[in-house]
Image: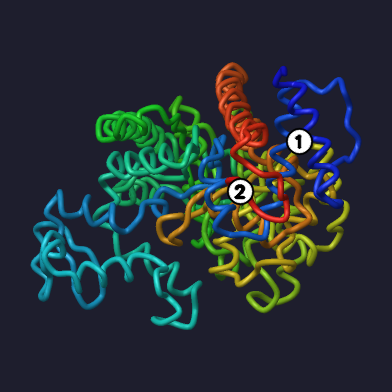
Amino acid sequence: MKRNTILLLVMLVIIAACTPPCLASNSLILGYSETDLDTKLVSGYFESIRNNPNELQAFFRAMPKGGDLHNHLSGAVYAEDMIDISARHGLLVDPATGQLGDANSTAPGLVPVSSAYSNATLYSSIVDEWSMRDYPENTGSGREWFFGTFGLIGPAKVYQGEMIAALRDRAAKEHVMYIETMMHIPGRYPAVAQVEANVSWNGNFSEMREALLDAGLKDICRQNADALAAYDARSWEFAGPGGKNITMRYIYEAGRNYPKMDVYTDLVQAFETANQSPLVVGINLVGEEDAYYSRTDYPLHMEMIAYLHSVYPGVPIALHAGEQTIGLVPPEALKFHVSDAVNTGKASRIGHGVDIMFEEGAHATLAEMRRLDIPIEILLTSNEEILHVSGPYHPVSVYLAYQVPVIIGTDDPGVERTDLTEQYVELALQHPGVSYEQIRAINTNSIRYAFLSEPEKGELLGRFNGDLNRFEGTIANRFTSPLYSFDLSGPLKVS
């Protein structure tokens, strides 16, 4: 019997066994292609396991994933990898606080990071200090603990090539094809500050930009581009065979939690670096939105970005917007961040967007995002750990209902002790109305909305679709095997 005929018969069995919404449609169209039938079979299987976290973990870990488009390099690397990097370069650590020092530091109480290999208590303590592991036992505020980790590992961040290699290898293990990681070149702050000292704020974005570039910022950005090329090459050297196959690109980030001249200088540096480096595919504005400067100057920041977009129209913009919730900021601060990022900041992608339904004109903003085809980057673990927003309180279902394209990302998977697989598991468990077909589209969106050229996206999409079709075909073949029964009240069972 031909495989297509077997699949059709099995589809009849599934339809008879399942109740809505087990399948997106209970009609069986004889004209389905084999790939379409595989997707329907996988959809039925997915519904049979969607309340089983262990089966979902196995399902999504095996599922090919397009990309991770919202990922911060400084928070993406697991503490265990940072220990290896730090030890390799002879860095020192304060056992009491987890604060790193460079190899030549003479501060009292520091010990070599490498000593943690023979001291299990120290090793475990460093992992706890550098990540969210066990944070409820350490502090009542996950948000406070999260942001406190980044300053501890500063001396290791100069080894970005090795950090990127760690990202490559872990992505390969969970079948991720592409990563856009947000980063900046470390060690440039003194030089940038010296440039900025020669330029005064006068409110004229054009004049200030030209003055900054002429004072030396253009040369710094050229150095940024060269340094990033070296980091990327080094990452390829350090990565394993699988990691070498991961496509990496970079989003240059500017900080928003500073006085306006500092933020503008940082934004000019981000746009100019992106303009000079073929590896930098966009810019982002990062930092807590509830901090004083980022909250009070938010509209001004969007105007800065709008101007720089007019100067660098070829540099895509992704913006953190709406990463806040009631109680974190005064109510009036919740009313405009996503809409301003869309309408003034010219964002091509929005990150987080948690406060969308607190905003004035929320429905109009959602409609505009749909019209302009602006996707939302959803970060479930991050929003739960930092903002305590999850389950029905998370607006991912709102974005889906308004047909805003959705992308799933990790944010800071190393610090948060998560990965892309877990984000899909949490999506299935916390949002039972999301179908496999929607998840499949979300997965595809992670390539479709990448900041790559159309030929590059086309090549990645071709590979991704082939991998995904093979994955679905493997699961569909299990339905046609005499070794398995068709009890869809649970996972497939060996007869």
Q: CA distance from mark 1 to mark 2?
A: 19 Å
On-image quarter of the N terminus:
top right
On-image quarter of the C terminus:
top right
Residue at the image point whose x is 43% and y is 28% from the top: 277
Q: Amino acid at mark 2?
A: Lys
Q: Picture coordinates of residue 196 (x, y %)?
A: 41, 49
Residue 277 against residue 42 in the figure, above or below: above
Q: Which residue is mark 2?
A: 493
Q: Earlier in the sequence, mark 1 or mark 2?
A: 1
Q: Is residue 173 visible?
A: yes
Could you say which is closer to the camera, residue 413 or residue 38? 38
Q: Quadrant of residue 387?
A: bottom right
Left or right? Give the position of 112 relative to 16. left
Q: Amino acid at mark 1?
A: Lys
The secondary element bearing badge 1 is classed as helix
Q: Residue furthest right?
A: 27
Name the mark nearer the viewer: 1 or 2: 2
Residue 472 against residue 46 in the figure, above or below: above
Residue at the image point whose x is 42% and y is 31% from the top: 246
> What colouring does the structure picture have?
rainbow
Q: Which residue is mark 1?
A: 40
Residue at the image point whose x is 42% and y is 68% from the top: 132
Could you say which is closer to the camera, residue 73 or residue 52? 52
Residue 328 against residue 285 in the figure, above or below: below
Q: Picture coordinates of residue 45 (x, y %)?
A: 69, 45
Q: Picture coordinates of residue 393 (x, y %)?
A: 73, 68
